[in-house]
Image (cartoon, grey):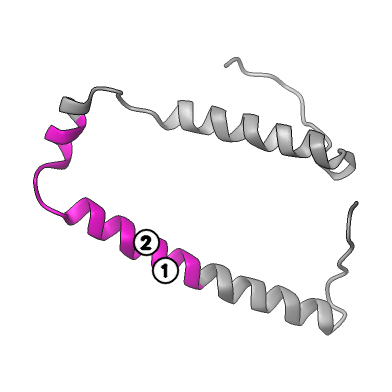
Amino acid sequence: MSDAKIKPVIEIMKPQNLLSYAGLCGWALVRAHARSGDAAVLTGYLGTSTAFEDALADFSEAYADQNERDHAALVAAVRAGKVEARSVE
């Protein structure tokens, strides 16, 4: 986990390399966001209410809805010729 001054050129990566790179990015993100592995600390922070679970569920639903709207807009833009879509194999 060191700061590197490079930018991978993902546009030309082979699919397997891109998949591996995405996995490493996800791993780094998880590590960067981790606060504690101590269950007691997390339980104490979250408390006994369902507020966290409710907020997480609400966010997830809103995010899924936004994702569907974004995808529909992208498909419409491709069909209208405003955005070029290519399949990479």
Q: Quadrant of the N terminus?
A: top right
Answer whether residue 63 is magenta in the image.
yes
Give me the residue at 67% from left, 37% from top.
Answer: 22
Q: How many marks?
A: 2
The tag on residue 62 is 1
Q: Please report contact status of discs 2 and 1: CB closer than 8 Å, yes or no.
A: yes
Q: Is residue 45 above or below residue 88?
A: above
- Predominant secondary structure, magenta span: helix
Residue bearing mark 2: 59
Answer whether residue 87 is magenta in the image.
no
Q: Is residue 82 left or right of residue 34?
A: right
Counting from the top left corner in percent of width and height, residue 76 is at 74, 82
Callout 1: SS: helix
Give me the residue at 15% from left, 26% from top.
Answer: 40
The image quadrant of residue 19 is top right
Please tell me which residue lies in front, 81 or 63.
63
Give me the residue at 57% from left, 73% from top.
Answer: 68
Give me the residue at 21% from left, 32% from top.
Answer: 42
The image quadrant of residue 18 is top right
Counting from the top left corner in percent of width and height, residue 47 is at 11, 42
Considering every residue shown, the one lying at the far left of the view is 48
Counting from the top left corner in percent of width and height, residue 58 is at 32, 65
Residue range in magenta is 42-65
Q: Is residue 41 left or right of residue 2?
A: left
Q: Is residue 42 left or right of residue 11?
A: left
